[in-house]
Image (spheres, rainbow, N blue to C red):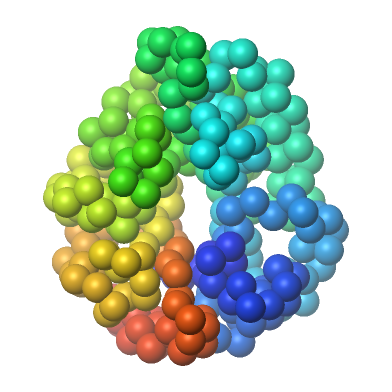
Amino acid sequence: MKIAANLSLLFTELPLIDRVVAAAAAGFDGVEIQFPYELPAIRLKEALHAAGMPLRLINLPAGDLMTGGAGLAAVPMRQAEFDLALEEALSYAAMVRPALVNVLPGRLAEGVEPEQAQACLLANLRKTAEAFQLLGIAVVVEAINPLDMPGFLINTPAQLDTLLKAVAHPNLFAQYDLYHMARQALDVQAGIELLAGRIGHVQFADCPGRGAPGSGELQFAPLLAALRVGGYQGWLAAEYRPGEAGTAASLGWLSEWRARLTHD
């Protein structure tokens, strides 16, 4: 397993384009960016190539989700907006070639019944998985804890399991975030075991606090072992808040993890 830096949370003291080089210099194997669309795709492509850094993941545009809204993926009356977001992501991804694209389910919109939201989400996930399959790019869908993001539709491994089975598309996988599971006091390892063989991407931060590994109480060694036992061969993405001292000061864990993963 290799380790990616989430450039939406790490190295934020730098402009986005410069974070690619900073991540390479720090010893990361690749990068991911939640919403890179502010940066012209050709500029990001050139920066990735110059630094020799693969792009592991970007998110599909999510509308107003990050500012407290319902987002796009499960809102029937915003279907046209979702379709435009999908077109934008397809065009952007065709240039920058991420390995994965993440679809955020969003919140239950006012005036929408849960069954309507579910049907809309299933259809949009299926449509997205089909569209990106033509580019050779896998699609993932993520569970997020409802404490940090109240009202989020998909919270648990069991809900992810149900969602994947309902969509039933070979190009759709789970994005499993260790922090989001631990934040809910769930059995993080049991979730890995439930989703084994269907996890397309793993993100991590310590818990509580969402800081760097070692800043909280989450025991990562057994979780990494469970991922290996479950056959996971993808990447681990550092998606944590580095704190006031900055990203460089938070990277004490990185060399140990790289040595452990290389040895294993």
Q: Position of residue 175 (x, y in %)?
A: 41, 46
Q: Is residue 176 left or right of residue 101?
A: left
- From the viewer's perspective, is residue 21 above or below residue 131? below
* Residue 142, x across and y down, in percent: 42, 41
| Residue at the image point whose x is 52% and y is 83% from the top | 246
Quadrant for residue 216, please give it.
bottom left
Q: Position of residue 10 (x, y in %)?
A: 54, 72
Say which quadrant the C terminus sits in.
bottom left
Front residue of this view, candidates 258 and 62: 62
Q: Position of residue 27 (x, y in %)?
A: 52, 84
The residue lying at 64 percent from left, 51 percent from top is 35
Q: Does 149 sit above or below residue 152?
A: below
Can you say which quadrant of the picture contains the N terminus? Answer: bottom left
Residue in the image at 22% along x and 48% along y: 184
Residue 35 located left or right of residue 229? right
Q: Identify the residue at horizontal 26%, vertical 39% (top origin).
A: 157
Is residue 154 something that shows in the picture?
A: yes
Q: Is residue 75 above or below residue 170?
A: above
Picture quadrant where residue 44 is located: bottom right
Nearest the eye: 45 or 75: 75
Q: Is residue 259 visible?
A: no
Residue 85 higher or lower than 27, as above or below: above
Which quadrant holds residue 156? top left
